[in-house]
Image (cartoon, grey):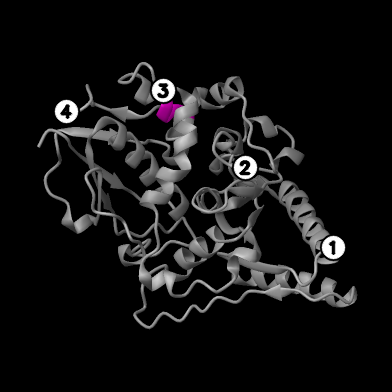
Amino acid sequence: MDNNIAYEFGTTGIGDRLTDITVLYIICKYLNYKVHIYFNQVTNNNVAWSNNSYFDLSLFDFPENNNIIVKNNYDKPDNFNTYIKLPYSASTGCPYNVYKFLKQFIPNLTFEEIISKWGNYAKEIIKPSKIILDKIPDNIENAYGIHLRKSDKLSNEAFNNYTDYRLNSMADEFTIIINNLIKDIYDIILKENEPSFLIVSEDNNWKEYITNIFKEYAQNNNKKINIININYDNPNNINNYNAVLDLFCLSKCKKIFQGIKTSNYSNIAAIIGNNKLINYSHLLKLSYIFYTNIYRPIININDKLEYDIDLIKIILLNIPFIDSNIKKIYQ
């Protein structure tokens, strides 16, 4: 049928994929198209946390409704005539670009409408399956979430040309971010009675190291803290079970601290959760060019929901726009 669109993912991360799914859902919901999303099941050896099946669809409860169908790549039929592409994943599909794309078809559409509906649309489409839901700890909504990230998000001068400065943290920047995150958590430990923390990371050694810092600080100050432990029992050996479980647990927390310059993983967790994010990129040089700024219209960052359209336009100057041959709203 004319209103069917195929969209095929490559080896992007969980955060990018879920952000793009939200973008595709919003576009097709407004334009009355049905997008068929297919996931490549391939290995990317350049990404430390990737494996043969980046995440198993059984971990999600994607609704089979009139606007979106999510399947594994081996189910893909012949290409449909209509296509849509997001060349730079979440940056191409940021809220302002989605607004600009849709305004071509809906002249009276406002940016304010798009950003006011974004979170609800994300929650409609990104839901955990029962496999994940059953493992989310009780009372996690009272915990502070801490997303620690290293591996591909931490760079050094030896491979500057390989990385994107707007996304990845240099070693000195990483130190500034972590030191300030630790300081904020110390303040919570001192001021609150037995605060709870959920700490997630793709690097278990780094997670253990930071966790022990907080435990030692609490003990030295005669304070009690609760570190929430997730049950990662995975009898069916489902690929990337831990990472998806971490994301949905993070989304349930009352506030999320980002231990990295920016991350679509914890961004999307905030969007489908309480939408409260603490980010430290404003403490770094050239912070105005960081990708964090293009998501400020829809994420409450550092207790502020504010944005600068002119700045967003500057950041997006070298980002490819949404590519599609859609010509009209499908009736």
Amino acid carrying label 3: it is Lys
Instruction: Please name whichever residue, 65 or 57, is drawn nearer the observer in this view of the structure.
Output: 65
Gap between marks 3 and 2 measured at Cα: 22 Å
Quarter of the image where one finds residue 240: bottom left
Residue 100 is marked as 3
State whether residue 310 is above or below residue 190: above
Q: Label 1 belongs to which residue?
A: 191
- The answer to whether the residues at label 3 and label 2 have Cβ atoms under 8 Å apart is no
Gap between marks 2 and 1 measured at Cα: 23 Å
Q: Label 4 belongs to which residue?
A: 331
Spot the residue most to the top.
107
Q: Label 2 belongs to which residue?
A: 300
Gap between marks 4 and 3 measured at Cα: 21 Å
Gap between marks 4 and 2 measured at Cα: 36 Å
The residues colored magenta run 96-100
**In the image, residue 184 lies at what x, y percent?**
79, 56
Could you tell me if residue 270 is visible in this image? yes
Instruction: Please name whichever residue, 32 or 324, is drawn nearer the observer in this view of the structure.
Output: 32
Identify the element where label 2 is drawn: strand
- The answer to whether the residues at label 4 and label 1 have Cβ atoms under 8 Å apart is no
**In the image, residue 225 lies at what x, y percent?**
75, 74
Identify the element where label 4 is drawn: loop
State whether residue 303 is above or below residue 289: below
Mark whose residue sits in front, 3 or 2: 2
